[in-house]
Image: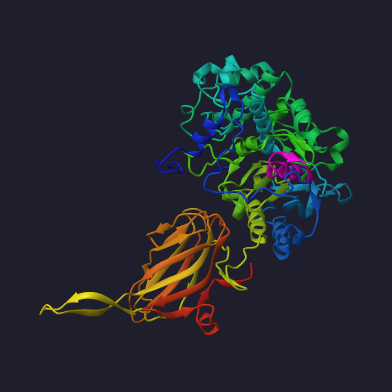
Amino acid sequence: MTEDTADSETGGRGPTRRHLVRRALALGGALAVAPFPAGPAKAVPPPRHPHRTLRHGSPERAGLLPDHLRRLVTDAETFLGPSPEHPWYAGAVLLAGRGDTVALHQPIGMAVRYSAYDAKTDTGVEFPAERQIPMATDTVFDLASVSKLFTSLLAVQQLERGTLELEARVAAYLPDFAGAGKQDVTIRQLLTHTSGFRAWLPLYKAPSREEKLRLIWNEAPLSPPGTTYLYSDLNLISLQLVLEEITGHPLDALLRNEITAPLGLHSTRYNPPAAWKPRIAATEDARPPWSGLDRGLVWGEVHDENAFSLGGVAGHAGVFSCAWDLAVLGRTLLNGGAYGPTRILAPESVELLFTDFNTAFPGDEHGLGFELYQHWYMGAMATPRTAGHTGFTGTSLVLDPTTDSFLIVLGNSVHPVRTWRSGSAPRAVAGNNLARAVPVRPARGRTSWFSGMATAASATLTLPALDTTGSAKTKGTTDSTGRTGSTTADTGGRLRCALWWDTEPRSDTLFLEASADGGTSWEPVPFTTVRDGEEVREHPTGSVTGWSGRVWHRLHADLPGARRLTLRWRYTTDRLYVGRGVYVDGVRVESGGRVLFDEARPTDAARIEAAGWTPSEN
């Protein structure tokens, strides 16, 4: 998956969340007042002050661990240097918080460093030192595709007001859109990138707005609508045209009147005025062949060629903003659509942003406009309800309702040229650090065992060899003479512990294994887990992966009988991304009515062998 270019959850047992949301839409497109289902990943309870506003404060006030917030900054600073060959960005502004507290708001590097790019030497031509501008907390960035979120919010507002229908055909609002086989494309498919549109078209080559639109009208889908996920700028450009048609207002006026003015986002707009230029991070020395247009250093104007050719106002790109304004927007959505006295969306509407409509396309989870559960840039903040978006210029916004936390990383990663950066490592690393800053309290006592969050790793937590050949009486036996009595039989043992896990699905896995031959061979140990208020879950393969709700589960496992049975937890990760990791606590093994091992006993705890696991207070 690039940034700017399964089965249903119920396994066939009932309606998917998509079906439930569709049922919740009343005729005419108005939203029903009943809450939308949250699905398997439940958000934290609504805050006591749902309209709360942001303020700066300490990590402790935010309920975050200060060391990991500091590491968020130091790790981000490493990408100012070769990563691996060139800086990933010239500079960035980092903002992280939880609840109503912004606990980190830190600029690093330079907002304006290069005047040009020298393609022959693959180097940046720097401005004189006195003309370079360092990043500041209020630096304004070209958000690139993060702009799509604003267009999506404007569309959801119209759904709420009944002027737009989620399942309506786009051609019902724009008759010319029906050409080339697009007559059945719906508003939902635009918002979830399932329309079949290709990723983009060089609209900037068309000399007039009318001819640019004609390219869209004449564009045929690459696949039948609703059958494939394909991220496309054309979806949000089309949605812009719908919004302007049904409201009678241009998109920039809608943004100002419906979102930025009500929320007081004074540094968020299309086409920033010239007076803002000293506050704006520069982007690219835009010249062919890497750019479609020959513009020189782009600074204070939209970077995206299509958005530029559309006058700077486009549904897919063009919005400029700063970290604080994006944090206010994020807090508004985490509040359920309100900030202080201002409400821009109903809570039921906000649920549409955090609800996966793409259950037919695992790995491409998507709410209305918002991407969900994407480890590649959310890092360990990713959950089935974590929502966000990235922008080609180096920007990103991540909202995790499960922990009520938010992260904004705004970088100028195409300064001086787009070819210097690849991947999304700084965003994922920042997400890992903020996720790690949210404490996981031990289930019992002061510490629990933590697997860590390293990539391409294998960590083992091993108990000492135990004799699990405990015996128990079995009544009602009969011998060969017909006499009855009782005998004894080996029953093996039973393991109990508390388990907490959140891993990258399918890629990172925790295994429970046993060996009866001193570790020469290992066999999986099936187990069950249960959390309060839910049914027991079977794990017949002796393993877990993915999302567990970020709460403690009680684990039980029947163990085979052996004179020297060794148990271990083995956690493996791939080389790309990680989740929040695994915690194990309160390990206890019994057999035949005897306690063979109890982690609460210091002598037993001292016999655990940990390779890659560490005792953690949080």
User: Is 11 on the left-hand or right-hand side of 290?
Assistant: left
**Can you name the residue that lies furthest to the bottom here?**
603
How many marks are shown on the rendered structure?
0
Q: Residue at x 53, y 16 (%)?
A: 179
The question of residue 471 being in magenta is answered with no
Question: Magenta stretch: dominant SS?
Answer: helix
Question: In which quarter of the view is residue 512 placed?
Answer: bottom left
Q: In the figure, residue 560 lies in which quadrant?
A: bottom left
Task: Decide which of 108, 485 is in the foreground and name it.
Answer: 485
Q: Answer whether residue 158 is visible to the viewer in this image.
A: yes
Q: Is residue 369 left or right of residue 461?
A: right
Provide residue 395's location: percent of width, then percent of height: 70, 44
Q: Which residues are magenta?
A: 324-339
| Residue situated in front as seen by the camera: 208 or 269 | 269
- Whether residue 419 is situated above or below residue 546 in the rendered picture: above
Coordinates of residue 551 in the picture (x, y in percent)? 56, 59
Q: Confirm whether residue 142 shows in the render.
A: no
